[in-house]
Amino acid sequence: MTRQDAGPRTGPGLPTGHARATGARRRAAYPYAFYLPAGIVYVVIFLVPTVMAFYFSLTRWTLFDSEFVGLQNFRDFFAEQNLSIGFANTFVYAVLTSGLKVVLGLLLGVLLTSKLRLRGFLRSVVFFPVLVSTVAVGITFSVLLRPDTGLVNKTLALVGIDGPDWLGDATTALLSVALVDVWKGVGLATVIYIAGILSIPQEYHQAVAVDGGSAWHRFRHVTLPLSWPATYSVIILSFIGGLRSFDLIWTMTRGGPGFTSDTIASIIYKQYQAGFYGLSTAGNVILFVVVTAIAVPLTWFLGKRQVAA
Amino acid sequence: MRTLRRFGAEGAALVVATVVFLIPFALMLLTAVKDEEQAIDLDFAWPTSWPVVENLMAVIEARDYVLLRAYVNSTVLTVASVALIVVFAAMAAFVLQRRPGKVAKVADLLVLSGLIIPPAVVPTIWLLQTLGLFKTMPGLILAEVAFNLSFAMLLFKAFIAAIPRELDEAAQIDGCGGVKLFFRVVFPLLRPVTITVILTSSVAVFNDFVNPLYLLPGDDNATVQVTLYNFQSQYSTQWNLLFMDIVLITIPPLLLFVFFNRKIVAGMTAGAIKG
């Protein structure tokens, strides 16, 4: 990326005088040196640590010196129950949040492209949480979800349901954080769907109207298949985001109660705080492998369906 | 009948969306303006007294004006990071879009990696430590630049693709070489997308919690997000002050949203779809 002496472009056949001239002119107009500022920062601050993580994850490490211990850190990660739980939680969280964002985003997208008055107002209301600080959202929802005084349980009590201690109960903690994540992120999914739905040519809707199709028919046979590219973006974006998610979990439960709502990202932080840098970095490598192992085939698979559709 | 049903459905959708999406904000605002005694209830009762100014001053003066310092830190962080992101990403995206080939393929792959791969935290700390930049503002700024470059490059690249090459050639005939061509001719034309990049990356950097938490610990350097996080344990009884802080932190993105709603939405959707 930062290579400057990339040499002349080698095309098929002998370079003619003209081609050489444009080649030289292109080099002058678009110098590879322009990659340098971005490239240096990216390589030094992002790429080098990413690569070094693979080595440090195999060591017992104090930042100043490291002792090679082989795969011990990874063994610890999967053997200790309070670490391996984060692995499962990360998947649950990512599947849950991205699934709900697809379904709710699509529904809101359809609703907010229909002939609704106050459409603009609603779009703003749904989208604004995307821009609000995650820490602020986390604190506010912790209050709303309090077992006795929180609005959620007070509302449930009105209809006779005795709500649980959402964040304090091991069975609901992760689920609650995931739902708040959906509340905050569904606005982005919605505007992506709105863009996708608005780009569907009007002729399709007219065709359904001419055939006398119902609204459901239009949704099932026009909107749903033709907003596939939007679905693809929403899935990739929210799945990767879900796997990496840290802020909200850390503000709302700190992985608790116990370790029951820990994800890989929160374990990385906990192990870092505890001074187990090698173990923390092993968590990072696992996260890297999980994200790539999922993102690459997903991009490939969904990309292929997109071409087919 | 049908219109009646449509009004009903419309009304229901409106009410549900408003309740679900606005109630948390109502709680923030109401609690922020209550007195300490009433704020403890954390309910939606109308404030009995309105100590707005007192709460505001108490939050600002808390712990020796830590919030003001946090605002200064966050502003420095956001402005510096975003300025570097804009210039670096625009330059790289320009060459990337205009000069296809092997180098461009590698660059494309790196951009994609930057969007997907989670940063390796402790190795980043180790590296910044080695460079003498750990726990410093410049170190955090560089990290924010590195982590946010990819998204900005996507937006720039897509926009540059729509600028005709003939323009570059005309400028070249007039004797503009690489640097002059880019900064005098092309960069000014990127204004619309530059504004979009400024908005989306400002929100991302200002709201970032993870990187300041790891890379810039300590009260002196804290950004507003970290300060808010620390306030959470400190103000466990003074909910009015905690929520006043939340309100203060929500104001900058709210202002951006009010003025640039369309640009932000357009930028985020375009980046998502192209990514």
Image (spheres, rainbow, N blue to C red):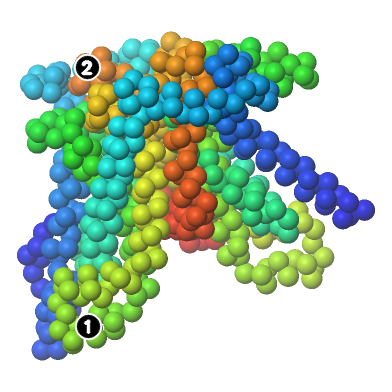
Q: Which residue is mark 1?
A: B171
Q: Residue at position x 62%, y 23% from top?
A: B49
Q: Residue at position x 56%, y 59% from top?
A: A196
Q: Nearer the viewer, residue B15 or B35?
A: B35
Crowding at label 2, few (<14), some or many (≥20) Cα neighbours within 10 Å? Answer: some
Crowding at label 1, few (<14), some or many (≥20) Cα neighbours within 10 Å? Answer: some
Q: Which residue is mark 2?
A: A276
Q: Please tell me whether residue B61 is drawn above or below residue B266 in the rendered image.
A: above
Element carrying mark 1: helix
In the rendered structure, which amino acid carries the disc numbered 2?
Phe
Q: Are marks 2 and 1 in contact (CB under 8 Å)?
A: no
Q: Is residue B46 visible?
A: yes
- Residue A249, x across and y down, in percent: 44, 25
Element carrying mark 2: loop
Q: Is residue B216 left or right of residue A157?
A: left
Q: Residue at position x 24%, y 59% from top?
A: B87
- Residue B104, x across and y down, in percent: 23, 63
Q: Is residue B3 left or right of residue B195?
A: right
Q: Please tell me whether residue B51 is drawn above or below residue A208 in the rendered image.
A: above
Distance from the alpha carbon under mark 2 to that under mark 1 = 57 Å
Q: Nearer the viewer, residue A239 or A143?
A: A143
Q: Is residue B188 left or right of residue A299?
A: left
Q: Is residue B118 visible?
A: no
